[in-house]
Image: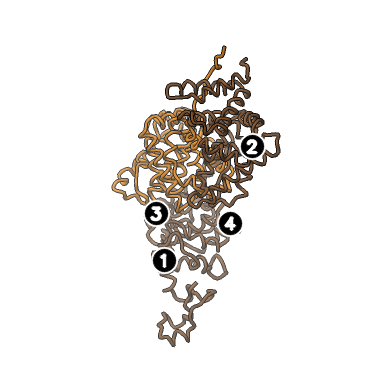
Amino acid sequence: KREMFPDLAPLLWHSFGTIIVLLQEIIVVYPVLSPPTLSLLASSRVCNALALLQCVASHPETRSHFLKAHIPLYLCSFLENTSKTRPFEYLRLTSLGVIGALVKAEGTEVINFLLQYEFVPLCLHAMAVGSELSKTVATFIIEKIVLDDAGLGYICATADRFFAVGTALAGMVTSMDDKPSPRLLKHIIHCYLRITDNPRGLEALQTCLPTTLIDGTFNNLTKDDPTMQQWLQELLVKVRSGKMGGLPPPVQGHMPRV
Amino acid sequence: MIPFNSAVAEDVRSLVQGVDDSTFDSTHRELCQLADCSPDGCSLLLQVCLDEVLLNADVAKSSRLKPELLSTVFKYCLDKPYFSTSFCEALKTVHVSDMFLVKLSNELNLSAGERVGVGLALSDSGNLGLITKGQKFSIAEIEEICANPAHVLTNDQIHDIVVFLHQTDGLSKHMDSFTNIISLLNVKEMPFYVPAPIKEGNARPTISSRHMELYTGSLDDDFDSLLSEIGKEISMADIITELGYGCTSDIAHCKEILSLFEPLDDMGISKLLGAVVCTHVGLGEAHNTYSTFMSAVGNSQPSDSSQFTAWNIDVLVDSINEIAPRTNWITVVENLDHEGFCIPDEAAFCLLMSIYSRACKDPFPLHAVCGSLWKNTEGQLSFLKHAVAAPTDTFTFKHCSRKMVSLSYARQSGLVLPGPSRGFMPTC
């Protein structure tokens, strides 16, 4: 019933001992993460604590406090996990929900925090092992990061970073052959499209954009969504425009003639 | 202002004819400068190109590099926003035969996109004959590619042509013509996109996708629905089972707890049933936390303080029907195909059947469990395994719409059927 209490976040943050209790609820399950012996009941309990922390992450009054206290770092263990069973998937999903609530607010403070503390690899991991919903939330987070100029520069700064992001995005496109997800595809396309705004990113995409985005495989998914259709159009125009080079650059000045 | 007259044309012509390795670059630069001057300069240059390509192609004294120079310069002009105008102007002094464009394109080694572009460029001509010839040429180019078995006009080729037209300032206005031509042909692969025609003349939009506010808006709307789904994905069924059997102690308490998750939809109810069925035993340890959670989520304590050891399905179903009277129990059964659903034993199966018979008087929807292959195939198999073994007062296939054998036929064939009262073997 979080929606019924608009001021729940400040109440949670400022009331004595509440946040530390929630953190204890999180820490108490660390021992059962590896080897993976987490029960559904325990997972559900932690997810409830994470849901309350998500309120704090969402609220404008408490978001900065949340970041300064480095609360998101307590979620790294959940995001790093590779188990695909339901208890761990719930943890992954709810943890991504907390990060997603942070990036949903516009602001460079959040993006800089996520870049500084290496949350991009954790999202890429969720894109690789998570459920469709986890993949979608993780891709949304990456999408928000690349929409930020610093985030876009960060990802395109080195070949290995770009390769990691490109591999994760392409992997999801490939696996979508069996289980298409229009909303996930939409976020993927938007990530690619934004990457083309960076010259290095555009150049790299010209060689590694998945074939199935070009050959009409996803016609059925895009035809019902004009926004996704337009994003895909622009993406392909941009990527293929770079291949039409070779024309001599325009020469300045006039031909001298006596 | 440079005087454009026959003297200049002669100078250009001699430059072209005399080009060699040492003068190629400088000649190329000078000719490009001429094209940059103005549409008139471009027109003059194109005219010289046409003369050299078509009229003087066989002159023995021609330089080895002349074709390359002409091709490069022509393509440079092709990229000018005023190419159409200049090209049509240059053609005024030339007799354009039916084979003119074909010969021109072959001599200049134009690509498929460039050929179509040249044909479309004639749309600007005031001469109706030229317009027709240009369109026929473009269509012929496309048809030739289609007719060649080894060269099907794939999406790649369409993309190349579209991108070429799109990024060439002088030709992007012909996108509509190209789209119409494509729609007339039987392209083997249907192109999945054609960029929208550019509205503002020859301007090329370079808006960063980051600044498209409309998309950002829809982005956040998407995420709000994601967050809502995350909450719904985890909440109701898991919390009910975590609270334990005390949730169904009586209707008042059950409704109080279920109301926390309103509105109840068929998918949520289906997942709740799956969770309840899987936990008909084993939740005894939850009793210790029941009173704690009840004080958190509700105001009243249960009047009966004895320990609860089983779900009260009558209370559960009646509470659901009161909170969500429009529940479609057929859909609820259809949604049993969800991750995690499983019938662990016969008692769980009987519990599920009791819930359904309490909730709905219609026959159990066999199509939901027998009509198609579930995504959760293990769950489906676990259901069917107990269904075929259940006595007929618990579950029956009698109302199945498709039957394989009658009892008498089965008896004649020597088939041994489980239970004397089972009369049909379903195949639906």
- Label 1 amino acid? Leu
Are discs 1 and 3 located on one and the same chain?
A: yes
- Which chain is in brown here? B
Which residue is found at the position 29% from the left and 46% from the top?
A34
What label sits on residue B381 in the rendered view? Answer: 1
Q: CA distance from mark 1 to mark 4?
A: 30 Å
The residue pinned by badge 4 equals B324
The residue pinned by badge 3 equals B286
Snapshot quadrant of residue A155: top left
Question: Which one is closest to the eye, mark 2 or mark 3?
Answer: 2
Query: Which chain is disc 4 placed on?
Result: B
Mark 4 Cα-neighbour bin, 10 Å: few <14, some 14–19, many ≥20? some
Q: Residue furthest top?
A: A258
Question: Which one is closest to the eye, mark 1 or mark 4?
Answer: 1
- Residue B314 in the image: x percent, y percent? 51, 64
Which residue is found at the position 62% from the left and 31% from the top?
B87
Q: Name which of mark 1 and mark 3 comes first in the sequence.
A: 3
What label sits on residue B96 in the rendered view? Answer: 2
Out of B369 and B30, give the one closest to the viewer.
B30
Q: Quadrant of the C terminus of chain A?
A: top right
How was this image coloured?
A: by chain
